[in-house]
Image: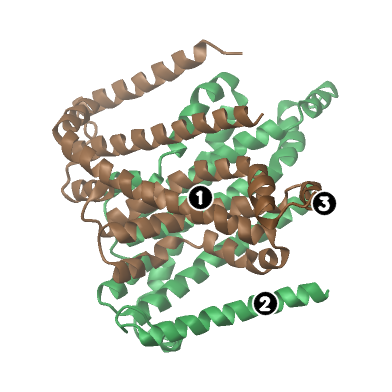
Chain colours: A brown, B green
Amino acid sequence: MRDPRVPAIQAVSVLAVLAAWETAARLAWMDPLFVPAPSAVARALGRIGGAALAGLGDTLAKTAAAYVLSVVLGVTAGLAIGSVRLLREVLNPFVIAAYGIPKILVLPWIVLVLGFGTAPAVFYGTLHGLFPVMVLVMGAVRDVDRTLVTVARAYGATTWQLYWKVLLPAIVPSVVAGMRLGIVFCLLGVLVVEMFAGVRGMGYVLSALANGFQAPELFAATALVSAASIAIVLALDHLSDKLSHWRG
Amino acid sequence: MRRGATVMLARAALLLGLLAAWEAGGRAANPLLTVPPSAVLPALWDLVRLRSYPDLAASLLLTLREIAAAYGLAVLAGLGCGFTLAFNRLVGRAYGPILAALYAVPAVVWYPSLMLFFGLDAASKIAFGFLLGFFPVTLAVLAGIRQVNPQLVIVARSYGAGPLTVFARVMVPAMLFTLVGGLRTGLALSVIGVIVGEILGSKAGMGALINHAYGLLRTADYVALVLVTLVLVVGSDVVASLAERRARRWTE
């Protein structure tokens, strides 16, 4: 069912947009101070390449820390809360509220308490990534086939075995879906902190370039972060495809 | 019934416990950094009486207008874009993946460029709120169209229904469930976009007030402003959920 016209259209469209953009910039239809030509952006990428890559590395390191925390805490809490009915019913509105509230409102307070730098970024990134994972896992544990649990109990499974051998394998698809969702949230959280109160990292680089009216460099840095996050998400998609094959 | 009562009681106890912990923690902590609820209430009262921030009403109105503009544009563009991609198979196959890839980028990376281009005033917040609200609406249209049973369309056509009738009487009711959900998510994200934009850099609006209070370490005022903004956030979601319920009742 592969249509050979699809990649052709995609390639032509991207090239057409770049060409139209370049022409418009060359003909000075747009102020180059705000919208630089793609060629200028490409040259700018060469200029800021090293600094931008260092910033990207810093951001990705914080994101990785926040991500590990989000997945571990989210899966553990989701499993614990989701499997105990009373706990789940009592805590559900709190979890949903914590998930839904715009976390940016508490960001000033987090920065006030944790200061500038790495700690608030990791904390805020975790705050963003934790709840989507937790909500997905809670729902998945609730929907695990009760028969599996009953049978395991009937065969004398201990509580530890029940969680480790029955519940956890049953919710793997939701954990993977949560991991796919969580990474973008973590990256978002880290970037927001760096923009708001950063001293390093890509978010800081972006806002510093914007404040300095360095449009070509800003566009180049934006393209770099975007490419990195698309690559990460595609890699996770690939991984989850492989995992689902393995699980059958 | 008894179980329901236990659950409600436990929730109330937990809420009270959290407030008590905040009160105790707030009293023990540095008052510049953390304030207890008992200090927030007077600040909230001052705020509502326009004592601490006389331009509260104007700021709220500005933020609301930014949200309305951002969401209106997001709905228009999202529906237009979604239906264009959905009705044209080839275009949908070509641009759908590009859209999905762009959705995988944390939207905040675009914000500095928007701020450079549109300036510090309302336009950059509207643009960012639009960007956040646009994707869920577009993706909901695409997902909704896939849920329409093609048999229904064929039957309606064979009974002589024109394309417009098929669209209005068959497709829209069949996809409404998904579409309305996307519209609700879009509103929530537009609201968040405007608030994030204001906090990351603005001269007016609720975000500017929050930044002002935070910058001067007026922590009680900051918490009061956050509470007022939360009312705005929760209120918009309540309106959206009422509209959602109504639309769902209409389809059944």
Alpha carbons under labels 1 and 2: distance apart: 41 Å
- The picture places residue B123, in percent across and down from the top left corner, at 34, 52
Mark 1: few, some, or many residues within 10 Å (few <14, many ≥20)? Answer: some
Does residue B124 appear anywhere in the picture? no
Quadrant into which the N terminus of chain A falls: top right
Quarter of the picture holding the C terminus of chain A: top right
Chain letter behind tag 1: B
Establish if B246 lies above or below B221.
above
Chain under numbered label 2: B
Disc 1, SS: helix
A76 sits to left or right of B206: right
* Residue occupied by mark 1: B72
Q: Which residue lies most toward the front here?
A: A156
Gap in angstroms between the C-alphas marked 3 and 1: 57 Å
- Image coordinates for residue B24, horizontal then vertical, percent: 44, 86
Q: Helix or strand or loop: what does disc 3 sit on?
A: helix
Q: Picture coordinates of residue B47 (x, y %)?
A: 40, 82
Looking at the rendered structure, the kind of residue marked 1 is Gly
Quarter-of-image position of residue B14? bottom right
Mark linked to residue A154: 3
Q: Nearer the viewer, mark 1 or mark 2?
A: 2
Q: Which badge, 1 or 2, is on the more N-terminal residue?
A: 2
Q: Nearer the viewer, mark 3 or mark 1?
A: 3
Three-letter residue code for mark 2: Ala
Camera-nearest residue between B204 and B111? B111
Cα–Cα gap, marks 2 and 3? 32 Å
**Along the viewing direction, whichever of A156 and A139 lies nearer the viewer:** A156
Query: Chain ID for label 3?
Result: A
Residue B10 — which label? Answer: 2
Q: Position of residue B251 (x, y in %)?
A: 78, 47
Can residue B142 be seen here? The reply is yes
